[in-house]
Image (spheres, rainbow, N blue to C red):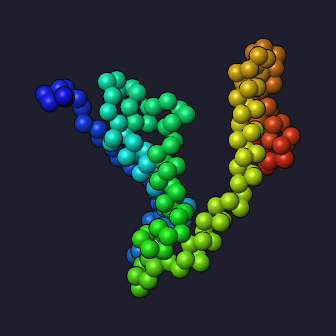
Amino acid sequence: DDIGSDRQLPIVALVCNLSPSSSSSNALLSHSEVETLYHEFGHGVHSLLSRCSFQHLSGTRAAMDFVETPSHFFETFARDPSFLSRILARHYMTGEPMSELRAQHLKQSHNDFRSVEVQTQIVHSRFDQALFGENPCSPALGGSSTTDVFERLHREAGIPFAA
């Protein structure tokens, strides 16, 4: 139905800040870097497969409640023990696959600080409400600065704040 149409083919580039190689060693990615790479790959696939009439609604410009879905989906592969031990993770010199036990530990470690992540999201939500709610904070209106509000919310939640 789109034969001869003027649709533009998507162009996607993944730009990641990954560990470099050196003259004495190969570039070896940490597990966190692999998760980031798979996350960004999800954005890339989303952009490549998007097909809509308006370019400003395609790919990562989709509705904000959906835009992270493909990325989070691909991240799960970097944490899946069977995928890690059978497909993804191999020793760079011997080619030996990662053990199931180590892969399981990596998956479990993802949840170690989940409560801090949830608490941080609550702080961000409260900050959003402070900025855009019924009584927005604004120095111009006699209120606190955004930095002061952000710091106060962190302290109330028991989350470290770095100025």
Q: Is residue 118 left or right of residue 88?
A: right
Residue 155 can be seen in this image: yes
Q: Kindly give the residue lying farthest to the bottom in the view shown.
A: 94
Residue 146 at what x, y percent from top left? Answer: 74, 29
Give the mark count. Answer: 0
Asked which quadrant contains residue 103, the reply is: bottom right
Q: Is residue 53 above or below residue 94?
A: above
The C terminus appears in which quarter of the rendering?
Answer: top right
Q: Kindly give the residue lying farthest to the top in the view shown.
A: 141
Between 161 and 57, which is closer to the camera in this rendering? 57
Residue 43 at what x, y percent from top left? Answer: 43, 44
Residue at 41% in and 51% down: 41
Residue at 19% in and 28% down: 1
Q: Is residue 106 left or right of residue 127?
A: left
Residue at 47% in and 53% down: 74
Between 66 and 153, which is closer to the camera in this rendering? 66
Residue at 76% in and 35% down: 150
Q: Kindly give the residue lying farthest to the front in the view shown.
A: 1
Q: Is residue 24 left or right of residue 114?
A: left
Q: Is residue 163 above or below residue 146?
A: below
Residue 105 at what x, y percent from top left? Answer: 63, 72
Residue 53 at what x, y percent from top left? Answer: 31, 24
Residue 24 can be seen in this image: no
